[in-house]
Structures are given as structure tokens and as C-alpha cells.
Image (spheres, rainbow, N blue to C red):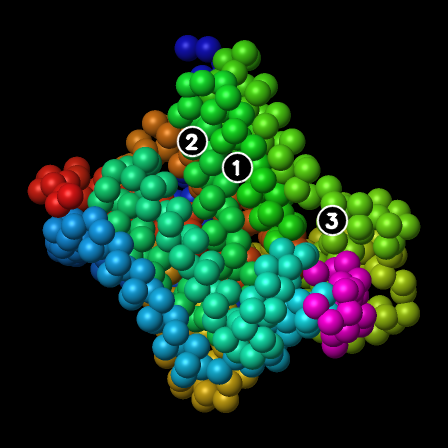
Amino acid sequence: MSLSTRLSAMLTKAIVVSAVFISLHGVFASFINRLPSSGPATLGLLVLGAALFLLLIYRFRDALQQLLNWTLGLLMKCRADHFIAFALVTGVTLRVMWWYFVPVTLVWGDAPANWALANNLIEKGTYVVTTTFGTWQGAYPPGLPFALVPLILLFGKGPIAVLCAQLIFFVWAFSIILPLGRRLAGEPAARFAAILLALLPNLIMYASQPLKEPLLIAELLTFLYGVMRSNEAAAQRSVIRWGLFAGAFFGLAVLTQPAVAPILVIAVILFWLQFEPSQRISRICAVVLAAVLVIAPWSVRQTIVFGKFTPLTSSGGWGFYTGNNPASRGGYTPYELFFPDLLTIPERDRSAVTFLRGLDYVIANPKHFAELIVRRQILLTCCLDDAARNSLSPAGYGTRTVALWQGFACAAWLFLAVLIIFNRRALMRAASSSPIVVMALSMPLVTFLLHSIMEAGSRHMIMHMGVWIIAASVAGAAGAQNAGAGSFHRVNP
């Protein structure tokens, strides 16, 4: 066995184990997400509750596997075109219903900034926004605001433009997840992934918010699909064409969320380990070149605006300092609590100044930093219900209603996590035979590690919901097949 083969096997095992760990972490985090206000006794009870939940699932695993087999069999009874129509119509209808009953309210988070930036591009031709923490020319990545521009021009500035954007992102992701699932694990996994994408409340709740996570899901899935087609291609021209395709969509993903950029390092490593020297260079160069060409115009714009090299955003250091300061609990901290003179610093210097202040704090307070890492990891993986709070609370819904929908979102996330945990061997086999599964699972790992040291929240993991769906579907379908549910592989044409 060659060195590259051994290294590839080790990397595959490490990434799959990390995916199972993050899923397991999410189960416990969803129970103890009130850690900042919980005493030791309460925390112990919550941990015990999470353990009992997993034991209960394990006790009834055979019955749950039979239910999954029945679900897969039911999905496979439909003709392919009927299934696609049903899943698409259901997903669109649920999103329209959410948008209708939960009005678009631009109050919290990035939603008002994204909307204002898109409108400023139309009205003034400028990319500037004023928020509660100052005026920014390059802090917000351009992916979503630029995507909103044609929809606002077409449908006006009303809430219908927000709905249309989110419906387009859903249909886009749906059109990719089906062929991606088929190539990775067959028709049952593809249909299961598609129906999950349509039905998960975590994603439906974005219908009334101009937020970037559904766009990121579509872009990252398209990147994976392009890499897979490049890997499968035999002709050099097809290898390069699909590599350029994948790289272009990865570049778009970086412009939507710069924090995904390190994923490209994993992709390059996997390319290097998977292929012979004569094959790896063309694949790596095609993906990297296309990504760089897509990102380059924005980097040039940023550098011109700030008078120094600024490749992506002017707020990178800010994300580090807002997560590491005396007032931090791991998530976002209002700047007035720890840096009241922030707005007196020119934007071109804010990232460097805030990063250095955060670094000084980490060096001076290693114990608090270690505590914040734990808190951030809990915030990252608990519930994945951020869209419920961001859309329902500003719309005037009460705490009970918000808690109910947060519960639905939490249950959906736990469902995906449990599928991965209890079908981990099937997932390992799938990853061993497909580097695309490994690359997909590496994405949430990169985010988990990066936001363990920066400001964190469940929205940072929502952008990987497409990956969790693919992983859960591959593992669940393989687990069902191993359990003897061979009949669901018969598909009506």
C-alpha cells in the first residue's frame, strides 16, 4: 500500500469520526444549550437527559430502522417524475405558507444589512450600509446582496422579492441534491435527501428572511457535484470543464460566506491523495483557478476602497474579538459592552485592531478562552433553530410559539444526527469508496474548528445542512439496505 493510499485512508477515517463526533456533540448540546445560566446540578441532569435519549433511541433502533425502511420503500413506489413534482410542490408550498403567516421583518442579524445593501446597489450604485455598529463599506460579503438585486428589480422592494429569492435557492439546491445523491448512494438515498430538503423546518423558516444560508447550501452542493463529475470524467477536457465549474461555484460560496474558504485546502489535499501525479495537477489547478477568478474582482474592489490588500472582508478580526472579550459568552457580543470606541477607528483598520485586541485578551486570559471554546461549540451544534427565533420573534409571535417552532427545528436536527450516529459504519463504507463523501463531511468540520475560536452560533452550521442531509441519507439508506430492505431499490420508471 502506497503512502498516499495510507494517508487517504487515515484522513477518511478521521473526517468520518469527526462527523459522528459533531453529531453526537449536537445531541448533548441541544440538551445543555442553556449552559451559561445552568448550575452544576442542572447541567448534570441535562447531560443525563441526553444520554437517556440516546439509550432510548438505541433500545428501539430496530423499530426505528423498520420505520425508515418503510419510508424509503414508500418513496421508491412513486414514479420518478411524480416524486420530483410532489417534493418540489410540497417544499415550495410550505415555504410560501411560512412567508404568508410569518411576515418579513428586517430587525435582527444580517437580514436588514443584506436588504439595505441590495437596495443601495440599485438606487445609488454603492456598496455601503449603516448598521447599529457603524457604517461599513466592505464588512458584509457580496454574495446574497448581489443575488437579491435582480429580484428586487423584477418584483419591487416588497416582501415578495425575499420569498422568490428563497424559493429559487430551494429549487436550485433540490435540482442538485437529487443527482448528487444518486451518484453517491443510489436512488433511495437521493429521494430521501430530496424530501428532507423539502420538509426540514430549519430550512423552511428562512422563507421570510433575506439571509444567506439557503444560498450557501445550494452553492456548496453545486461545488460538490462539480467535483464529483470532474472525478468521474475520463477525458481531460471534461476533467477541466467540470473542475472549472466546481471552482466557480466554490468562489461564489466564498463571496457569500468567506469562512468557507479553508474548505478548499481539504479539497486540494483529497485531490492530491486520490489521483496519480499526472492527473492531480489538472484537477487542482482547474478548481483553484476558477475560484480565484470568481473572487478576484471583489478582492480588487476591496483593495481599491481601503487602500491596502483586503481579499474578502474588512471585519474578519471583528468576528474574533467579539467572541473573545471580557463580556463574551461565546456568541455575538454588542460592541458597546467591550469596545465602545469601535466606531472611531477607520474601517480599513478595524479588522487588524480588533484582531490584535482579541489576541491580547486570549493570551492574557487562557482559562476564559478555553471556557469560551466549549461554549462556542455548544452554540454551534445546539438545535440549529436560529431561523425560528430570527423570523418569529420580530414578527410579534410569543415566546411559547417561538419555543414550539424551535422544538420542531431541534427535533429535525436530532433526527439527522441520530441517523449519522447509528449508521456510522455505513457512512464509513460510503466515505471509503467516495472521496466526495469525505469532502462533504470535511465542510462542517472546518466550520466547527474555525468558530471554536471565533464568535459562534447555530447559523454557522445551518449552511452545512445540505451536507448533513446528504450524510444522513447515505448512512440511512445504506443502513436500511444492510437491514435487508432490498425491496425499496425497485423503482418505478
Give the side of residue 370 with respect to residue 123, left or right. Answer: left
Mark 1, other Cα within 10 Å: few <14 / some 14–19 / many ≥20: many
Mark identifier at residue 438: none
- Near-viewer residue (431 or 220): 220
| Residue matched to label 2 | 229
Query: Is the C-beta separation of discs 1 and 3 under 8 Å?
Result: no
Q: Indicate the position of residue 84 as horizontal and vertical percent values.
A: 26, 54
Give the residues in magenta.
122-140
Q: Secondary structure at mark 2?
A: helix
Q: Residue at x 48, y 71 (%)?
A: 163
Residue at 50% x, 41% y is: 223
Pointer 1 residue: 246
Q: Are marks 2 and 1 in contact (CB under 8 Å)?
A: yes
- The vertical placement of 3 against 489, above or below, is above
Q: CA distance from mark 1 to mark 3?
A: 19 Å
Assign the C terminus to one quadrant of the image.
top left
Q: CA distance from mark 2 to mark 3?
A: 28 Å
Mark 1 belongs to which amino acid?
Ala
Q: Residue at x 33, y 46 (%)?
A: 178
**Secondary element at tag 3:** helix
- Label 2: few (<14), some (14–19) or many (≥20) C-alpha neighbours in 10 Å: some
Q: In the image, what residue occupies the spot 36% across and 67% down?
A: 92
* Distance from the alpha carbon under mark 2 to that under mark 1: 9 Å
Q: Nearer the viewer, residue 25 or 195?
A: 195
Residue matched to label 3? 298
Q: Earlier in the sequence, mark 1 or mark 3?
A: 1
Mark before the other along the chain sequence, 2 or 1: 2
Mark 3: amino acid: Trp
Find out whether residue 139 is within the magenta segment: yes
